[in-house]
């Protein structure tokens, strides 16, 4: 089942919501998120997120506090627990940057672990509803973010596979995610905050009622199965969901604010020239 036909939506305020693909995603032009939206504006954005799953607010001029204030309209913020995520003592916002002490690119990717397919914080007892990423500085080319319409991917499963995964729970665990990603193992604080937690493999969206494939690199094993027995099915679902026909590639523009619904999408970062281009992002998570 595909996305609805592409149709531009413009209201009396002049704010335009324009779909960017037939898979998922819409850009919003004319909004000013340095001020809090009115109730009708916010309801329009919320409905657009349910419809398009990924929203790109173009040409925003936002401070960290602006981003936090806008994010809090959607729900309580999640604490950033990854090592290095906290800057200036703030756990409500994460600064992702490849700028060195001299302000120049340091040659490091802003988040190596994010290059794997995942849905944010699925290893937490209360996972992420939505993620907010603001592009303070973005590379002139590359550094795109890939998004999967996991509801469309679920719809495209065979009836036999739907029956097989409906009712199954996958256990997500931060320790597995770090180990599998070949990066530093989870800290004691992360392990305390994020013990193994289970979520449905086919998750029903509370607003739309549609089911979506809910797994990704944080999924460790299926409840009641061994890790060895679980891996083939989890890998098969991820491979199915990440086919090109379910993917939208977001090409960043400076001052984009991108929001995505983690309950019905997967996403992955891509590489860019980390030695010659800056990438500085502000990130918040809504539970």
Image: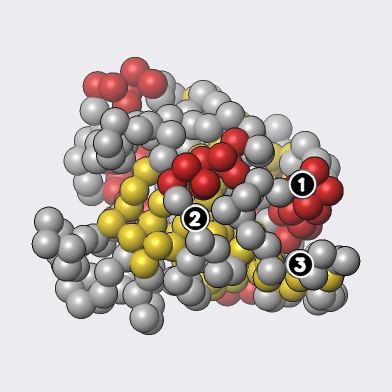
Question: Which residue shows up at 51% across the image and 61% down it?
Answer: 61
Residues at discs 3 and 2 in contact (Cβ within 8 Å): no
Splitting the image into 4 quarters, where does residue 156 fall?
bottom right
Splitting the image into 4 quarters, where does residue 269 fall?
bottom left
**Looking at the image, which residue sits at the far front?**
35
Q: Secondary structure at mark 2?
A: loop
Return the residue nearer the eye: 202 or 46: 46
Q: Is residue 19 left or right of residue 146?
A: right
Residue 10 location (% of width, % of height): 83, 70
Residue with the mark numbered 1: 38
Badge 1 density bin: few <14, some 14–19, many ≥20, Cα 10 Å: few
Q: How many marks?
A: 3
245 in relation to 92, above or below:
below
Residue 212 location (% of width, % of height): 69, 48
Mark nearer the N terminus (2 vs 1):
1
Quadrant of image for the N terminus: bottom right
Question: Which residue shows up at 23% across the image and 70% down it?
Answer: 274
Does the image show residue 75?
yes
Splitting the image into 4 quarters, where does residue 149 fall?
bottom right
Mark nearer the N terminus (3 vs 1):
3
Residue 145 location (% of width, % of height): 47, 66
Q: Is residue 45 left or right of residue 61?
A: right
Q: Is residue 245 left or right of residue 196?
A: right
What's the coloring here?
Answer: secondary structure
Disc 3 to disc 1, C-alpha distance: 13 Å
Mark nearer the N terminus (3 vs 2):
3
Q: Secondary structure at mark 1?
A: loop
Residue with the mark numbered 2: 62
Q: Secondary structure at mark 3?
A: loop
């Amino acid at each position: 089942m595909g996305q609805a036909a592409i149709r531009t939506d413009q209201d009396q305020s002049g704010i335009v919501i324009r779909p960017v693909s037939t898979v998922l995603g819409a850009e919003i032009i004319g909004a000013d998120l340095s001020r809090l939206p009115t109730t009708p504006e916010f309801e329009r954005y919320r409905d657009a997120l349910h419809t398009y799953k990924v929203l790109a607010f173009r040409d925003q001029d936002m401070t960290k506090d602006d981003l936090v204030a806008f994010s809090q309209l959607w729900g309580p913020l999640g604490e950033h627990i990854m090592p290095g995520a906290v800057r200036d003592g703030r756990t409500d916002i994460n600064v992702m940057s490849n700028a060195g002490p001299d302000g120049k690119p340091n040659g490091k990717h802003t988040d190596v672990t994010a290059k794997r397919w995942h849905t944010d914080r699925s290893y937490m007892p209360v996972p992420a509803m939505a993620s907010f990423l603001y592009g303070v500085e973005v590379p002139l080319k590359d550094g795109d973010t890939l998004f999967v319409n996991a509801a469309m991917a679920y719809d495209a499963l065979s009836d036999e596979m739907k029956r097989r995964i409906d009712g199954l729970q996958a256990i997500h665990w931060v320790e597995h995610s770090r180990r599998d990603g070949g990066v530093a193992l989870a800290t004691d604080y992360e392990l305390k905050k994020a013990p193994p937690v289970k979520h449905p493999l086919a998750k029903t969206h509370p607003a739309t009622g549609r089911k979506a494939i809910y797994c990704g690199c944080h999924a460790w094993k299926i409840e009641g199965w061994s890790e060895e027995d679980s891996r083939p099915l989890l890998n098969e679902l991820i491979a199915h969901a990440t086919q090109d026909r379910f993917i939208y590639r977001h090409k960043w523009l400076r001052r984009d604010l991108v929001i995505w619904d983690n309950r019905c999408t997967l996403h992955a970062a891509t590489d860019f020239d980390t030695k010659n281009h800056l990438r500085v992002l502000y990130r918040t998570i809504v539970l």
